[in-house]
Image (cartoon, rainbow, N blue to C red):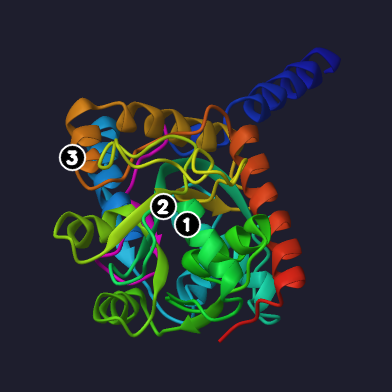
Amino acid sequence: MKRLNSMVVAAIACLTAVPAWSQSGPYPNKIIRIINPLAAGGNVDIVARGIAEQLSKQLGQQVLVENRPGASALIGTRFVKGQPADGYTLLAIANTFARVPAIISDAGYDPLKDFTGVSQTCDIPMVLVVNPALPVKNVREFIALAKKRPGELTYGTAGNGGTGHVAAEMFSQQAGIKMMHIPYKGNAPAITDLVGGQIMLMFDQVSTSVGYIQAGRLRGLAVTSKKRSPLFPDMPTIDEAGVKGFEDTTFNGLVAPAGTPRDVLEKLRGEVVKAVAVPALRERFDKLGIPLVASNSLDEYNAFLRRHVEDFAKLAKTAGIKAN
């Protein structure tokens, strides 16, 4: 009897030692959904779809993108928060994911407690663009003009707390200037007014400003990334242009509900690493000004998310950033 009991205990130990997903077959054994909480056609959407297409090929299982936009991405984000933590429902995110809870008290989720990272997927530089009528040709001239006219230079954004707003506030603080914020209900109307001269400048994503710059309808002064953009190899970074240490980019990534087994997360991260290394996929997105990247480890990505959450919370308090 003692021998039988020992065998039972040993068998149970073996069962609990195997990966969680193996109890119902190798992961994945059904469709994986990536929920995009933002509007279709934006960077988050097109990057998620590109990654999903490649993951489907690698995994031999369908990976589908489902759009659930609305309420500053809250609808889709809350939906994923409530899904089983099994690796079959993921959330496509951007900077907004880490920022919304700091400016909306009833956001309904904690980015660090309710979710866990899978991998970053891209890192998109922004560009400081001005209306060509503004008498500046570089960042130093722009800062000099802003100091002569404190609070007069108007910059447009897609809304309070958005990527363009945060970049402008960071730039203002580091450059020692004051500008006037004009929030819009979306990026498109802001660019339209910038081209028309109703506002003077924007911090816009390279991927959406490139056509206007190439056509001479906007003037690009510098990019916000550490490295120059392949689309504008002759355009300096803001750091190179004199505001030392400045960097602010738009990241995209994937997260899963908290509690998702680590082996599932590792599997997914590893597949994202393979996906972004596919030459055809990289070339496709490079032409759009969207460099694909993947995280080196789960811990690295979670630390990256934590840093964004904490840094923005401090900036929001200092700059008085509030929801629209």
Among numbered discs 3 and 1, the one appearing first in the sequence: 1
Q: Residue furthest right?
A: 2
- Which x, y percent locates residue 261? 60, 40
Residue 160 sits above or below residue 243 on the image: below
Pair 3/1: label in front: 1
Q: Residues within 10 Å of mark 3 (few under 14, many from 20)?
A: some
Any part of residue 113 in sight: no
Q: Amino acid at mark 1?
A: Glu
Q: Which residue is mark 3?
A: 284
Task: Give the residue drawn at x 20%, y 62%.
Answer: 212
Q: Amino acid at mark 3?
A: Arg
Q: Secondary structure at mark 1?
A: helix
Q: Amino acid at mark 2?
A: Asn
Q: Which residue is mark 1?
A: 141
Distance from the alpha carbon under mark 1 to that under mark 2: 5 Å
Any part of residue 248 in sight: yes
Q: Residue furthest top?
A: 3
- Which x, y percent locates residue 272? 39, 34
Depth check, front residue: 85 or 295: 295
Q: Secondary structure at mark 2?
A: loop
Q: Residues within 10 Å of mark 1 (few under 14, many from 20)?
A: few
Distance from the alpha carbon under mark 2 to that under mark 3: 30 Å
Residue 36 sits above or below residue 247 on the image: below
Residue 229 sits above or below residue 200 on the image: above
Q: Which residue is mark 2?
A: 138
Task: Give the residue drawn at x 50%, y 52%.
Answer: 140
Depth check, front residue: 153 or 30: 153
Label drawn at residue 105: none
- For the magenta stretch, what is the residue range? 26-42
